[in-house]
Image (cartoon, rainbow, N blue to C red):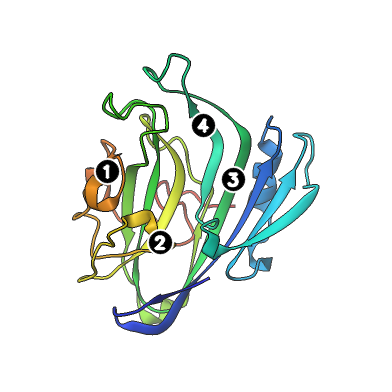
Amino acid sequence: MSIGAFGYGCVACAIQIRSIGAQLNGGGDAAHIVNWVNSYDITTVGWGDYHQGNFSNPSETTPDSTSDADCSSGACSPQNYLVCVSSSDGGVTCDTAPCGTPMVNRTQYLIPVPLSYYVIAYGTSVSAAPPEYRSCGEGGDWFAIGCIFPAGSPGSYPLTVDLPIPDNTLDATILVQNYYLGIISPGATIPGGGVLSEEITILPNLSSLTPSNAGVAGFGASWAGSISTACQGPIDDPFTGSDPP
């Protein structure tokens, strides 16, 4: 999928996206689907495509079948649905449990010209939400942490950015299940539908976001401190610095 940055000095350029994922139908130990996704050569996936392996048994090391979708469907952002939020007491306490249908994917972006990008880790509240939102994943998305990677020198572009399967251990009170990449352009306007309303959203900065204009239920305790820290780099996990496979 191509995202034109119209009106922000980049009329003709486009960001390209591709993603590789896997799903284990019926549930169970998801180790093999994670290994398959991490070892898959993502460069064989066409730009604009989401390629998914469909597993039917935890013992399988390769999928029974594969399927494809266009990134315009919203399928391409990195996701980690190995663990989901659950409740055994009507929502008073939010616990976590293995997802009924485990699914993971990782994503590669191609940024053609010098642009600053941001990454946000978000998911569902486990215990940080106020009681009125503490319905174990039903209260809306929560932003856990964010970072910005500044635009580099022209010689380093086009820039390939690899975002791995999201790290669901980043925040003790928010179950991080998603990473989201967007572009920073001073003077941009936050879209009325919120940050997550588009495949790639252009923002003026992260500091002007509020839960209301971001379109989310809230921000985690680490959000304010995290957004002044630069992302680790285009080939690393943006928050931990580890190398994605």
Q: CA distance from mark 2 to mark 3?
A: 21 Å
Q: Earlier along the polypeptide chain: callout 2 or callout 3?
A: 3
Residue at disc 4, secondary structure: strand
Amino acid identity at mark 2: Glu
Q: Nearer the viewer, mark 2 or mark 1?
A: 2
Q: Earlier along the polypeptide chain: callout 2 or callout 1?
A: 2
Q: CA distance from mark 4 to mark 2?
A: 24 Å
Q: State whether residue 101 is above or below residue 72.
A: above
Q: Nearer the viewer, mark 4 or mark 2?
A: 2
C-beta proximity under 8 Å, tags 1 and 3:
no
**Residue at coordinates 32% horizontally, 54% vertically from top-left?**
147
Q: CA distance from mark 2 to mark 1?
A: 21 Å
Residue indicated by mark 4: 84
Amino acid identity at mark 4: Cys
Amino acid identity at mark 3: Val
Q: Earlier along the polypeptide chain: callout 4 or callout 2?
A: 4
Asked which quadrant contains residue 225, the reply is top left
